[in-house]
Amino acid sequence: MGRVFVAGSINMDVVATADRHPKVGETVAGQAVHYFSGGKGANQAVSAAKLGASSALIGRLGADAFGQQLRQFLGEQCVDLALVKDTAETHTGTAVIIVADADNTIVVVPGANALVSAEDVAAPQFAKGDVAVSQFEIPQATIGAFFKRARAAGATTILNPAPALPCSRELLGLVDILILNETELGLLAQTELDAADEPSRFIEAARRLPIGSDKIICVTLGKRGVLALIQGEASLIPGRPVKAVDTTGAGDCFVGALAARLAKGRTIHDALEYANAAASICVQRMGAAPSMPTAAEVAALLG
Ligand code: ATP
Ligand code: RIB
């Protein structure tokens, strides 16, 4: 069985819940404040670990109280933290999140995540069958170095280009599987997309990405599920009908679950169904990392 290596961000999510999102310049009364473990890298590593994969995180924390709390929580989720460094120069990554109507707005202050370096990602010894995962909350040069090493050893690379940022053709050329939502797809394909668009619009945009037709592209569509382009052929896996409470981390749950399944040697089609089911559980709970499901929960759902 392969291992999952995630190079990515670790954040403390400071979450305020309210009946609705404030407009610019407006103050609304909130209901509660929570401190949840978050950051796209940490969330994806937790998702993979809770689903039974050997999951190692490569990243940085500040030498502060948030850093200590996150290290403890992530260790308790069985994420291997041997390659997570404490950094004295700056603070732990922090995300300020407002959740209302099961949807969120987020401001991320990267702190230590901005310092994750090519040296940091030189440590893992990849083998064929391993899966290397990253996202855009650490420097893109670091992701490039990480993926080059992974591919040289025959590992599979997964990029979740979130949050939406431009990126080079060279980096996309190092990706085996691209997992992105409609906003990220619109930016990379340089086209206007809306969440409510017909699937054909997303397929057309995905086909336009400079990534090569041998690569796999998965466009996550929230409650509508996920659209996959595999060897140029499109298929839609419909979302599962559930009552969403907080969608923060749904994309991360999906990415971690897909990586865990591929590391287990399952096919991409199996991994897509599995990740779609796992993410439907995640959205029914509050928080990012704490809402990731266990393998038993997903197995119960899939019967
Ligand atoms: P986030 O940035 O909030 O983590 P995202 O935009 O990256 O999310 P989404 O496309 O919203 O990712 O969701 C990822 C996956 O989670 C979907 O493809 C689907 O499998 C599942 N999902 C999300 N929202 C729902 C929902 N309301 N009901 C069922 N499944 C959902
Ligand atoms: O994808 C969700 C994550 O994005 C949150 O946990 C937050 O930390 C931001 O990085």
Image (cartoon, rainbow, N blue to C red):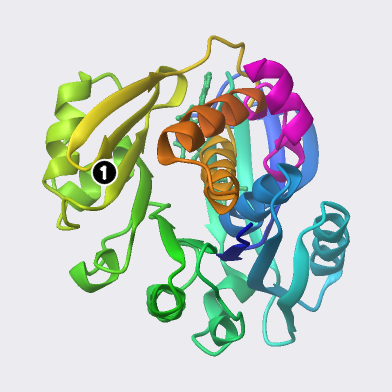
Magenta region includes residue 289: yes
- Quadrant into which the C terminus falls: top right
Q: Is mark 1 within 8 Å of ligand 1?
A: no
- In this rendering, the answer to whether 141 lies above or below 240 is below
Q: Callout 1: few (<14), some (14-19), or many (20+) C-alpha neighbours within 10 Å?
A: many
Would you say 179 lies left or right of 37 here? left
Query: Residue at 72% of width from left, 30% of height from top?
Result: 286
In terms of depth relative to the viewer, which is nearer, 100 or 251? 251
Query: Residue at 26% of width from left, 43% of height from top?
Result: 185
Q: How many marks?
A: 1
Would you say 261 lies left or right of 76 here? left
**Which residue, given by chain and number where applicable, does mark 1 sit on?**
185
The magenta segment is: 282-303
x, y (%) of residue 139? 44, 74
User: Looking at the picture, which amino acid does disc 1 mark?
Assistant: Leu
In terms of depth relative to the viewer, which is nearer, 63 or 162? 162
In terms of depth relative to the viewer, which is nearer, 294 or 156? 156
